[in-house]
Amino acid sequence: MIQLERLTDAVQEALSNLRLDMTINENRVTIRLANPEKENSAILDAVFRAGGRVQSTAIVGSTLEDAYLKLVRKEAIE
């Protein structure tokens, strides 16, 4: 989750160009990621390059459905 000072058109376009599964609620952008630790820096870089001002970020825990799907995918690979 990224809380922005203000979600501008430029920031929204930059995030859209990354083709993310995201939800926008006013100045808060929630993004569903498979690996937040690896993907966060590219997302924040895109926000900063578009002139965005970040107030805070947070990693929101997975839903039960997300945890189940992750487990099923892992077992399918093995």
Image (spheres, rainbow, N blue to C red):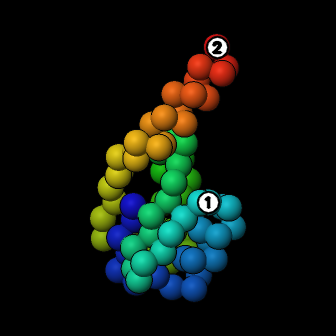
Q: In the image as oriented, which residue stretches furthest toward the top? A: 78
**Where residue 20 is drawn, which disc sits there?**
1
| Circles 1 and 2 in contact, beta carbons < 8 Å | no
Image quadrant holding the C terminus, namely: top right
Residue situated in front as seen by the camera: 64 or 25: 64
Asked where in the image residue 12 lies, by quadrant, the reply is: bottom right
What residue sits 32% from the left and 55% below the top?
58
Task: Tell me: residue 20, above or below residue 24.
Answer: above
Residue 69 in percent (x, y) is at: 54, 36
Q: Give the crowd class for mark 2: few <14, some 14-19, many >=20 residues within 10 Å.
A: few
| Image side of residue 34 versus residue 77, left or right | left
Q: Secondary structure at mark 2?
A: loop
Examine the rendered structure and indicate whether residue 70 appears above or below residue 41. above
The disc labelled 1 sits on which kind of residue? Leu
Residue depicted at x 58% and y 24%: 74
**Does residue 78 show up?**
yes
Residue at disc 1, secondary structure: loop
Spot occupied by residue 43 in the image (x, y as percentages of width and height): 53, 58
Residue at left 47%, top 43%? 65
Which quarter shows the N terminus?
Answer: bottom left
Residue at 51 percent of width and 27 percent of height: 71
User: Where does residue 39 sit, x and y in percent of width and height?
Assistant: 54, 47
Residue 41 visible in the current orientation? no
Q: Residues within 10 Å of mark 1 (few under 14, many from 20)?
A: few
* Kind of residue indicated by mark 2: Glu
Instruction: Using the rendered view, name the quadrant where residue 25 is placed.
Output: bottom left
Which numbered dot is residue 48?
none
Residue 54 located left or right of residue 52: left
Q: Which residue was labeled with disc 2?
A: 78
Residue 6 percent location from the top left of the image: 40, 84
Vertical comparison of 36 with 46: above or below: above
Q: Closest to the observer: 37 or 31?
A: 31
